[in-house]
Amino acid sequence: MLTPSRGRALTLPAANLSGGMDSDHIEKQYGRPPPRTKGLTYTMTARRKLAPGRLIAATHNPGKARELAALLEGGGFTTISAAELGLAEPEETADTFRGNAELKALAAARAANEPALADDSGLACDGLAGAPGIYSARWAGPNKDFRAAMQKVEDGLKAETSPDGEVDRRASFVCVLSLAWPDGEVESFEGVVRGQLVWPPRGDKGFGYDPIFVPEGETETFGEMAPERKLPMTHRALAFQRLKTFLLE
Ligand code: ITT
């Protein structure tokens, strides 16, 4: 069990503060919130680090598995997915991205007796009050028909057209990455990328909702971008950057 370090002040990335993830985590683990010092600075705990080696990508989604492997390569990690290991796919019973990411990471880590990294992610549309959100995979149905899921998003947005004919096309891709150890320790980090939804879908290079999402400041959809161009600007890469800062370096 880790003990809180004394007096090691660290400024957290903004998303961790606004998401309250780190203060939640500290409160859960030590029974009290982190001491607040000046401004946005918390006195942090010394966290368990992950040693390079094999890491389980606790996913059955090949698009995610590819992106997680690309993010981890170079740091001395090789990944193997839960699908490749034949691990069961746990039911996503939580009502938050973080809850589902943690349950997937813990299930894989316990089943394989090795650390595991899970990703729970999705598309949150402003015009649909955040839907499909944690239901992003479920909107594609059992056959994983993302053409139908994207059509459902578009139909939903059109149905919400304002009286002056405006369709709110703003959206976010959200990702929570959770790293779990077999003894039940788990750490989570969030990344969000803002963008605009387009119709019709464009490009076939990505997966899921990529063909309808244009990230802020870009003109191409994620589906039109080469994987090396898409990955660094994703919700997944942002979450990974935070995880790396705290757990890998
Ligand atoms: P695992 O639970 O096995 O990881 P899943 O596909 O069921 O796979 P989620 O429950 O996290 O994963 O569902 C997230 C869905 O959101 C996913 O199926 C994608 O369609 C979509 N999504 C997430 N990240 C995406 C990205 O970078 N590009 C396009 N779509 C994405």
Image (tube, rainbow, N blue to C red):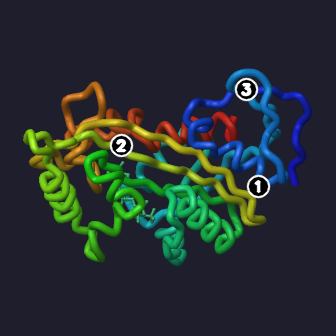
Whichever of callouts 3 and 2 sits on the residue coming sooner in the sequence is 3
Q: Are marks 2 and 1 in contact (CB under 8 Å)?
A: no
Q: Looking at the image, which residue is at 51% across and 73% down?
A: 93
Mark with earlier residue (3, 1)? 1
Read off the residue under disc 2: 172
Question: Where is residue 57 shown, x and y percent of the image?
Answer: 53, 58
Q: Earlier in the sequence, mark 2 or mark 1?
A: 1
How many numbered callouts? 3
Residue 112 visible? The answer is yes
Give left or right: position of 244 versus 224: right
The secondary structure type at the circle numbered 1 is helix
Residue at image position (79%, 35%) is 44
Q: Is residue 123 visible?
A: no
Local packing at callout 2 (Cα closer than 10 Å; few below 14, some 14-19, many 20+) is many
The type of residue carrying mark 2 is Ser
Q: CA distance from mark 3 to mark 2?
A: 27 Å
State how far apart marks 2 and 1 are (Cα): 28 Å
Q: Quadrant of residue 240?
A: top right
In the displayed structure, does residue 95 sit left or right of residue 12? Answer: left
Tell me the residue that label 3 is attached to: 41
Give residue 127's mark: none
In the image shown, does 203 or 188 lie closer to the viewer?
A: 188
Residue 11 falls left or right of residue 171: right
Q: Residue at x 71, y 43 (%)?
A: 23
Residue receiving disc 1: 28
Residue 74, by quadrant, is: top right
View extreme (front): residue? 163
Alpha carbon distance from label 3 to label 1: 19 Å
